[in-house]
Image: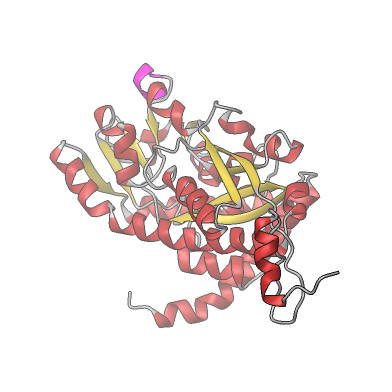
Amino acid sequence: MKYIPLLLIPLLAFYSGCSPKATTSNGDEVPTVKKRNMRLVSLQNTGTPIVGEQVIWLADSINKMSAGNLNLKVYDPDKLVGALEVLDAVSSGKVEAGYSASGFWMGKIPAAPLFCSVPFGPNSSEYQAWFFHGNGMKLYQEMYDTYGFNVKVLVCGMIPPETSGWFANEIESLDDLQGLKMRFFGLGGDIMKRYGVAVRLLPPGEIYPALEKGVIDATEFAMPNIDEQLGFYKIAKYNYFPGWHQQTTTFELLINKDVWNSLPEHQQAIIESASKANIIRGIAAGEGSQGPAMKRNQERGVKQITWPPEMIEAFRSTWNEVVEEKAAADPFFKKVWDDLKAFRAEYKEWGDRAYVK
């Protein structure tokens, strides 16, 4: 056998069509990265500012960070599955991943809204502290495991406070809520029911048509610039603040657990890092775009009204009753609520002193 200089071996490998194996600094062989194509179904229409755009930002970031080896193709609601079918579709393996908000699953899992938005609850900083420094993420995953859903959950988005509703007529007292048909999300809807509101939980794409046809009389959905794109101001001219029912709203990335476990650690880390970065982007975009939207609404004749203190206190008092009843009725709800409540009590020592009020 003829002697071949070592320096020529890479060239020979190149020309023979099999490139040499990459190695680490320790000489260990780096495994070949398998390209993964994943279908990512969204509960939100991707054309909706921030809440829909977040899933596009996330998929793009993961693709770039993985150098194209993780390709997430995003599908709008009803393209592959219906908006309210995302959790089941991911769990069953019908699709690999989904983007949603856990509050939509409260009919299946009583505790689910606690991971999405809490009436009179934490702002975005405090919520993140509970998720990533407290027990939030541990309990979030435990919830899906306990209820038999085969998913890995990550928080992948977060937005600042919402408005608390668009109404066709001014609400001057709690009595004015009696008999209203209103789209309302999450645990706040249980509070509104106590005041005689017929609450419906509609996915985003169904809200405006329901308003237009009179199926509902009022709605809440998101922040002013998001609600603006859905056109609520064309029908309802009274927009109420603050969003006591959703001081922060989180969004989840669900990945089929078998798919997640099949990914190498570095690809899992890419998805986790991109998800956390997406949270910052959502908060920044949300905080930075509301002022101009509110000015536009004012020019359209929208009355932007702050709830009087006595009504806010009434909502708060009712929430305290509702949450204790729910905790008494469901052990896992109680477990999560007790943990969040204890975390918030400790955080309060800091929060009440650290920030200018």
**Residue range highlighted in magenta:** 210-214
In the picture, measured across the screen, residue 263 lies left or right of residue 43, that is right
Q: In which quadrant is the C terminus drawn?
A: bottom left
Does residue 31 lie above or below 254 as drawn? below
Residue reaching furthest to the left = 299
Q: Residue at x 77, y 53 (%)?
A: 262
Q: In which quadrant is the N terminus drawn?
A: bottom right
Question: Along the line of sight, which residue is nearer the eye, 339 or 41?
Answer: 41
In the picture, measured across the screen, residue 239 lies left or right of residue 158, that is left
Q: Residue at x 54, y 43 (%)?
A: 186
Is 45 inside the magenta-drawn segment?
Answer: no
Residue 160 in percent (x, y) is at: 40, 57
Residue 293 in percent (x, y) is at: 23, 46
In this rendering, does residue 322 appear at all?
no
Q: Residue at x 16, y 36 (%)?
A: 300
Residue 51 in percent (x, y) is at: 44, 45
In this rendering, does residue 141 appear at all?
yes
Q: Residue at x 42, y 53 (%)?
A: 244
> Dividing the picture into quarters, in which one does residue 334 lie?
bottom right
Query: Which color mode does the image show?
Result: secondary structure
Question: Along the line of sight, which residue is nearer the eye, 297 or 15?
Answer: 15
Q: Main secondary structure of the magenta part?
A: helix
Question: Along the line of sight, which residue is nearer the eye, 205 or 56?
Answer: 56
How many numbered circles does the render carry?
A: 0
